[in-house]
Every structure is written in structure tokens, then in C-alpha cells.
């Protein structure tokens, strides 16, 4: 993916019109905001979705998050390569249209299966739109101070979009309906498409080679099979033939992907990038960090709303300190990077974040205090992640040739998304298994409580049973947080040992990638 291709200073539209760079930036930034919003906006609506669609299993509910992150991460590299060859503006608009169509499907879905399908298609739309938008930005703005400013705005929108998604998701869910967390994308996508036609020039990389559709299908299909096996293992039984068959299918698909990458003329993931020790360490670190972090939103949203009865808006605002502190941590990490290099940050950052997950795993109870238990944990997680993200980004691109910088950066992003999907599946499976072990009658008790609530026949016995259900649920989530902490500690060990990038090279890579924002 040609992310840092040189652009002529006087770039124009095909009809000779001068490009209005400010409006072009607004268009691609709006589209990027939509993609980032959908990574968090849905989380706040999950309890309402579960009630509306009669979803009783948290494992099944997790697919609403997983389907998006898996297809987004699985097709991200392919999207960038298609954009370079076919035309970035065309692919950008196609991705926006696909994203809007999937959002409409999600907004009118009447069952969980249809909603999960819509989320998967949304991820594919985002995988087309996001890399094309970034490439367009680097084509429109010439290298140097002008591009640095544009990339800073882009990075700020990417960082702020997560916070805005949580708040907007809460507002839409509470005052309109959970369906509007999807339908809100329609006018945004329309603005992006119309704006692209009027203000964004077409561009392509004439040197771009073919693209590896087989690889994208194999990696995404294999990961989906793996996640399905993990999610359904507790229901089918871990030794059941259906569970083993899904695991076998995942293994075969991923093995086929490896063979295709080694033999393809234009592989999705060039092996030369992974042969770089520092890039490999950053990619593995990103995957493990995604695996450890994504579940924090999922579990805590359920704790806030389903267990403690918080409103969607209150739940969204509860995460605001976390998203703000990630930005603060990233700013501190950017300054430290040029002084101490990335390796200390890659060790300290995940350890600090892991301490936050350990606090949740050991201290969270059904009625825990937000200020006394949850907020301190979020502060640790956010501070650690802010330091880590900056070091990961610089390490991923510092050790690779300039022509592979775009691929290395996209691979890092894809690894984090894929890691988040796999991690959520693993942590959900672990938490569900623990919940059922401490309360063998959990499923039956949950059904009894739900029926009593629906019929209005809530008795003292029902309240006692509900308290037992909540205790088992939160106990399971606590184990999930502890496992998440082990993923982060693993990231510190692997990235800290593999990454060998000087502080000068890391600082230069960070500046060139625009990640400091």
C-alpha cells in the first residue's frame, strides 16, 4: 500500500480544477470518523440490542463486536492494495456506499444473525474506505510541514472518534433507539460520497501489482472459524466433534493462507516485512494488546448496564477519562520516544495497562464503586496504552524500507483488530466457563429470572436468585480480566525482547507516519 507516495505540489482534478485541500481533508476525515465511531458506538447499545433481539448469551452477543473487527482487520491490507491499483477515490466511495448499505441492514435487523452479517459487511466497507482515505490524504498534501499538519488532524480525529462513539452511542440509544447507532451512518456516508465526487481527486499507483484476494478470504475465514469454535466451545463441549471440526477448519484455512503468502507473486503479507525483527515484535505486540484490551469495553458495559442498571449515556461517559488519558499518554510517549527509544515504553506501557486489568479482575464485584474500583483501573489501562501505541507504531515502520512503510503500518493496525476479535472470543469463553463452574445452574436460573421480570412476577426468591446470577457473571468477567492481563504481559515480554530500534530511528518513523497525534 503506497501510503507515503510523493504528490505534485499543484495536483488537480481530471477536469483541470484545482483541488481545495481543506475540503478534501474534511471529506476523508468525516469518513475516517465514521469508521472509528463504529468501533465503539455499538458497545454502549449492546444491552439494549440483547433485550430487543432476545439474545441471552454473552458469547453470542460478542459476535456483534467480533464480526466487525475481524472483517475490518482481515481485509484491511487487501483494501489498501485495491485502492492503489483501481483508484483511491473510487475505492473510497465504494467502501462508503458498502458501509452505508450495511448500516441500513443493521438498523432494520430483526434477529441477531442478520445484525452480525451487517456488522461483517460494515467491516469490509471500512477496510476499503480507511486505507484509501489515508492514501488520498498523503497524495493531496505534499510531503513536509503541510502533510504533517494534515496527518496530525487525521490522527486526532482517529483518537477522538473512540470517545465520541461512546458518548454518541449513549445518546442515540437512550433518546432514540439502538437502531440509530447504525442508521446515523447513512447521512455521514452520503456526505462523504458527494464530497469525494466534488472535492477529492482520483489517484492510483501505476507501479501497483496485483492483489491477493485468496489470502484475504483464507485469513478472514480461518479466523472466523477459530472465533466460532471458541465462542461455541462452552455450548457444544470442548471435546465435541462440532467444536473440533471448527478448530480443524480454522487450522487448515490458516495453513493454506501461509502457503499462499509464501508462493504468491503479490502476497497480502510480504514475508520480507515479517523477517524484520522489530516489525515482527511490534505486530505480535499489537495482536496481544488488542486481545487483552478489547474485552474491557464489552465486559464493563454489561457490568454497568445489565448488572447495575446504568443508562447508556452514563455508561458512555464513564469511559471518557480512559479515551482522554490515552491521548495524554500518547503525547508523553511521543516525547519520551526520542529520549529513551521504544523498547522501555513497550515494556512499561503494557505492564501499567495490565495492572489496571488485574485491579478489575481481583476487585470488581456487582456493586463496586466506579470511583474506587473502576476509574483507577481505567486510568492505568489508558496511561499504559497511550505509551504503548506510540512505541508500537514507530517500531513497526522504523526497520522496514520506505516502500514497505505503508504495508507495515497497515499490518500493525490489522493485527490489533484481529487480536481484539480473537481476544474477545477467548476471554468470553473463559469467563462463561468460569461462570458456569461456580454456578452450575446459571443458564436455568437466568431463564427463570428473565421470565419473572417479563411477567412482572418478581418475588424475594427471584431477587435472591438474581443476586446469585450477578455474582457468577461478575466472577466470570473477573477471570476474563485476569486472562486479559496475561496477554498484555506477554506483549511486554515479546515486543520488548524483539524490538531493536534506536531512539533516533523511532522518532523519525513516528514523525513520518503522523502517529504523534
Image (cartoon, rainbow, N blue to C red):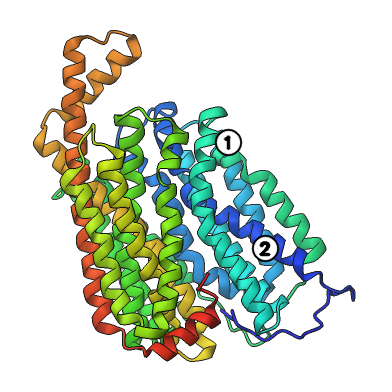
Label 1, residues with CA under 10 Å away: few <14, some 14-19, many ≥20: many
- Pick the front one: 429 or 28: 28
Calculate the distance from the C-alpha at mark 1 to the C-alpha at mark 2: 23 Å
The residue that mark 1 highlights is 180
Horizontal relation, residue 443 to residue 405: left or right:
left
Q: Which mark is residue 28?
A: 2
The residue shown at (48%, 91%) is 401
The residue shown at (30%, 36%) is 303
Residue 390, image x, y percentages: 42, 73
Horizontal relation, residue 454 to residue 358: left or right:
right
Q: Residue furthest right?
A: 16
Q: Is residue 139 above or below residue 354?
A: below
Where disc 2 sits, the SS reads: helix
Label 2, residues with CA under 10 Å away: few <14, some 14-19, many ≥20: many
The residue shown at (80%, 80%) is 11
The mark that comes first in sequence, 1 or 2, is: 2
Residue 353, image x, y percentages: 28, 61
Looking at the rendered image, the quarter that the N terminus falls into is bottom right
The residue shown at (26%, 37%) is 369
Q: Is residue 44 above or below residue 229?
A: above
Q: Which mark is residue 318?
A: none
Where disc 1 sits, the SS reads: helix
Q: Is residue 399 above or below residue 310?
A: below
- Pick the front one: 25 or 333: 333
Amino acid at each position: 500500500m503506497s501510503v507515503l507516495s510523493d504528490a505534485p505540489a499543484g495536483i488537480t482534478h481530471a477536469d483541470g480544477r484545482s483541488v481545495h485541500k481543506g475540503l478534501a481533508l474534511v471529506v476523508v476525515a468525516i469518513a475516517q470518523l465514521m469508521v472509528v465511531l463504529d468501533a465503539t458506538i455499538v458497545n454502549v447499545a449492546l444491552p439494549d440490542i440483547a433485550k430487543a433481539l432476545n439474545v441471552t448469551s454473552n458469547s453470542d452477543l460478542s459476535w456483534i463486536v467480533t464480526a466487525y473487527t475481524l472483517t475490518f482487520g482481515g481485509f484491511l491490507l487487501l483494501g489498501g492494495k485495491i485502492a492503489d491499483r483501481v483508484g483511491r477515490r473510487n475505492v473510497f466511495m465504494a467502501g462508503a456506499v458498502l458501509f452505508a448499505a450495511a448500516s441500513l441492514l443493521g438498523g432494520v435487523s430483526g434477529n441477531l444473525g442478520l445484525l452480525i452479517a451487517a456488522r461483517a459487511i460494515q467491516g469490509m466497507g471500512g477496510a476499503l474506505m480507511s486505507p484509501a482515505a489515508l492514501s488520498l490524504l498523503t497524495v493531496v498534501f505534499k510531503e513536509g510541514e503541510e502533510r504533517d499538519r494534515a496527518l496530525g488532524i487525521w490522527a486526532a480525529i482517529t483518537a477522538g472518534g473512540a470517545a465520541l462513539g461512546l458518548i454518541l452511542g449513549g445518546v442515540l440509544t437512550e433518546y432514540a433507539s439502538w437502531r440509530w447507532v447504525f442508521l446515523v451512518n447513512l447521512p455521514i456516508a452520503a456526505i462523504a460520497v458527494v464530497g469525494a465526487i466534488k472535492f477529492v481527486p482520483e489517484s492510483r499507483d501505476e507501479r501497483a501489482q496485483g492483489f491477493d484476494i485468496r489470502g484475504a478470504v483464507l485469513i478472514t475465514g480461518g479466523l472466523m472459524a477459530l472465533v466460532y469454535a471458541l465462542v461455541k466451545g462452552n455450548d457444544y463441549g470442548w471435546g465435541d466433534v462440532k467444536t473440533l471440526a471448527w478448530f480443524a477448519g480454522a487450522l487448515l484455512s490458516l495453513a493454506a493462507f501461509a502457503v499462499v503468502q509464501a508462493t504468491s507473486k503479490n502476497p497480502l503479507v510480504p514475508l520480507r516485512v515479517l523477517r524484520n525483527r522489530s516489525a515482527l515484535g511490534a505486530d505480535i505486540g499489537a495482536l496481544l494488546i488488542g486481545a487483552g484490551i478489547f474485552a474491557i469495553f464489552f465486559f464493563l458495559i454489561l457490568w454497568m448496564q445489565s448488572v447495575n442498571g446504568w443508562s447508556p449515556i452514563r455508561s458512555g461517559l464513564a469511559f471518557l477519562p480512559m479515551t482522554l488519558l490515552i491521548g495524554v499518554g500518547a503525547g508523553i510517549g511521543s516525547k519520551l520516544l526520542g529520549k529513551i527509544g521504544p523498547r522501555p515504553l513497550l515494556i512499561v506501557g503494557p505492564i501499567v495497562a495490565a495492572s489496571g486489568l488485574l485491579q478489575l479482575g481481583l476487585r470488581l464485584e456487582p456493586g463496586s464503586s466506579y470511583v474506587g474500583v473502576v476509574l483507577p483501573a481505567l486510568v492505568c489501562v489508558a496511561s499504559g496504552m497511550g505509551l504503548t501505541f506510540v512505541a508500537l507504531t514507530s517500531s513497526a515502520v522504523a526497520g522496514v524500507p520506505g516502500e514497505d512503510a505503508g504495508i507495515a503500518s497497515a499490518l500493525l493496525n490489522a493485527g490489533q483488530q484481529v487480536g481484539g476479535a480473537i481476544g474477545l472470543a477467548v476471554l468470553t469463553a473463559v469467563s462463561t466457563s468460569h461462570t458456569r463452574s461456580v454456578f452450575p445452574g446459571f443458564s436455568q436460573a437466568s431463564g427463570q429470572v428473565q421470565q419473572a421480570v417479563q411477567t412482572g412476577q418478581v418475588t424475594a426468591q427471584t431477587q435472591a436468585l438474581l443476586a446469585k446470577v450477578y455474582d457468577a457473571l461478575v466472577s466470570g468477567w473477573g477471570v476474563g480480566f485476569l486472562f486479559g492481563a496475561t496477554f498484555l504481559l506477554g506483549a511486554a515480554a515479546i515486543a520488548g525482547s524483539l524490538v531493536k530500534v534506536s531512539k533516533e530511528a523511532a522518532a523519525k518513523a513516528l514523525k513520518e507516519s503522523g502517529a504523534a497525534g
